[in-house]
């Protein structure tokens, strides 16, 4: 299903001409904010479009916001391996700085360890994740950098799983925003970082421990869904936040920001002031697709109904829609079968999609009994 049918292209053009893809301002656009941060960026969580930047591509220490990458790798492994149990060792807890209170002999699942790490900003938990997943900090650093390359973090190099200072450990505000955009696509990650308090279950000794998130924006800012605080003397106050309103997600990053809570409030307010409402609707997409072996020679198909989402105005104004349909289908086809897709792109990136489904059922053609001459020439004379 990688080509348009002629009918699909005609339908697509007609829909655009009819103005069924529309946008209107949802908020009055605000003035660009001033921030205290040395480095800052604000991006759309859907498209990655940069809405604000200040030294966003300048390399800088990022402190415990590093744990976003550690958590992402841990949760990806947890999903692959069935959430394995981690046995905490002396080596794992032999690390300075903030802690979730782990002790050698503790046992807990990898997802629970990750939750404690993100809420309590536990360096012990980050070290435990690294040693469990790779056997050494060096090995885990290699994993972090490999994943960073996949995400497109071009100005980042990880050394420590926790964010403790190291000359070779650095990132940029923009790269950290890209990392967070990817991490928030993992539902387990979002479920953890949006919690202000969470009970973490220990298997040994059996019980639960309650942790409170260091991210005050979860209570201070409407729609906040995370993400991570950080501080070292070298990095200063670092903060990555995300907020969602009317289906739109914004991600803000500040590095070395004395007034980070106010910075993020101003950045997110500015971003939401730039939103426009966009109608994603494939219901008007109709076509007939040729059908092989059916009681009819074609089948009626239709795009599914969509919804209204908010996007940055710059993205809303450049949306492209593509209708993907197969050249033909094989019978039988049942009403509701997915047969294609309506895709929406902004800046070359897919931001939304809807299925195209069969609008009717068409059974396979009935087999006819062979006639006299067909039987004669297919007679077995042996």
Image (cartoon, rainbow, N blue to C red):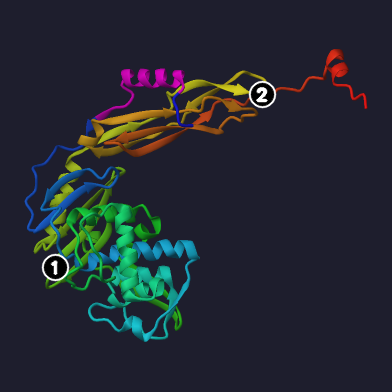
Above or below 36: residue 301: above
Instruction: Work out which residue is located at the far right of the displayed protein and give it.
Output: 382
Q: Could you tell me if the residues under marks 2 and 1 are in contact, i.e. CB atoms within 8 Å?
A: no
In front of the other: 139 or 323: 139
Residue visible at 34% across and 84% down in the picture: 91
Read off the residue under disc 2. Answer: 293
Instruction: For mark 2, give the secondary structure.
Output: loop
Q: Is residue 240 left or right of residue 79?
A: left
- Mark 2 vs mark 1: which is more N-terminal? 1
Q: Position of residue 271 (x, y in %)?
A: 18, 45
Q: Position of residue 174 (x, y in %)?
A: 19, 53
The image quadrant of residue 291 is top right
Above or below 333: residue 197: below
Q: What distance separates the C-alpha of mark 2 from that of mark 1? A: 67 Å
Q: Position of residue 322 (x, y in %)?
A: 38, 29
The image quadrant of residue 105 is bottom left
**Which residues fall within the magenta stretch?**
5-23
Q: Main secondary structure of the magenta part?
A: helix
In front of the other: 56 or 253: 56
Q: Is residue 90 covered in magenta?
A: no
Instruction: Work out which residue is located at the far top of the displayed protein and give it.
Output: 373
Q: Position of residue 246 (x, y in %)?
A: 29, 43
Q: Is residue 22 covered in magenta?
A: yes
Read off the residue under disc 1. Answer: 235
Above or below 320: residue 173: below
Q: Which mark is residue 77?
A: none
- Label 2: few (<14), some (14–19) or many (≥20) C-alpha neighbours in 10 Å: some
């Amino acid at each position: 299903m990688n080509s348009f049918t002629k009918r699909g292209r005609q339908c697509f053009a007609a829909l655009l001409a009819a103005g069924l893809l529309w946008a209107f301002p949802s908020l009055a656009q605000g003035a660009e904010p001033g921030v205290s941060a040395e480095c800052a960026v604000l991006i759309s969580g859907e498209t990655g479009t940069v809405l604000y930047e200040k030294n966003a591509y300048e390399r800088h220490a990022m402190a415990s916001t590093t744990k976003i990458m550690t958590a992402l790798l841990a949760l990806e492994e947890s999903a692959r391996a069935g959430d394995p149990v981690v046995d905490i060792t002396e080596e794992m807890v032999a690390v300075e700085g903030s802690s979730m209170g782990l002790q050698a002999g503790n046992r807990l699942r990898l997802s629970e360890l990750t939750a404690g790490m993100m809420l309590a900003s536990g360096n012990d938990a980050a070290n435990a994740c690294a040693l469990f997943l790779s056997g050494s900090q060096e090995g885990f650093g290699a994993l972090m950098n490999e994943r960073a390359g996949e995400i497109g973090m071009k100005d980042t190099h990880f050394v420590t799983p926790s964010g403790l200072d190291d000359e070779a450990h650095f990132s940029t505000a923009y790269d950290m925003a890209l990392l967070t955009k990817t991490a928030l696509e993992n539902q387990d990650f979002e479920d953890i970082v949006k919690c202000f308090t969470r009970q973490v279950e220990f298997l040994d000794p059996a019980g639960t421990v309650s942790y409170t998130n260091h991210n005050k924006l979860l209570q201070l800012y409407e729609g906040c869904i995370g993400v991570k605080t950080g501080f070292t003397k070298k990095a200063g106050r670092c903060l990555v936040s995300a907020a969602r309103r009317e289906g739109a997600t914004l991600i803000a990053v500040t590095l070395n920001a004395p007034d980070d809570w106010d910075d993020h409030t101003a950045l997110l307010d500015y971003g939401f002031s730039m939103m426009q409402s966009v109608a994603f609707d494939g219901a008007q997409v109709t076509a007939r697709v040729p059908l092989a072996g059916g009681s009819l020679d074609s089948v009626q198909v239709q795009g599914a109904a969509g919804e209204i989402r908010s996007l940055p105005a710059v993205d809303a104004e450049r949306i492209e829609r593509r209708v993907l349909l197969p050249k033909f289908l094989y019978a039988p086809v049942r009403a509701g079968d997915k047969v294609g897709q309506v895709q929406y792109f902004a800046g070359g990136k897919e931001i939304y999609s809807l299925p195209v489904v069969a609008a009717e059922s068409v059974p396979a053609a009935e087999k006819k009994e062979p006639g006299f001459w067909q039987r004669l020439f297919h007679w077995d004379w042996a």
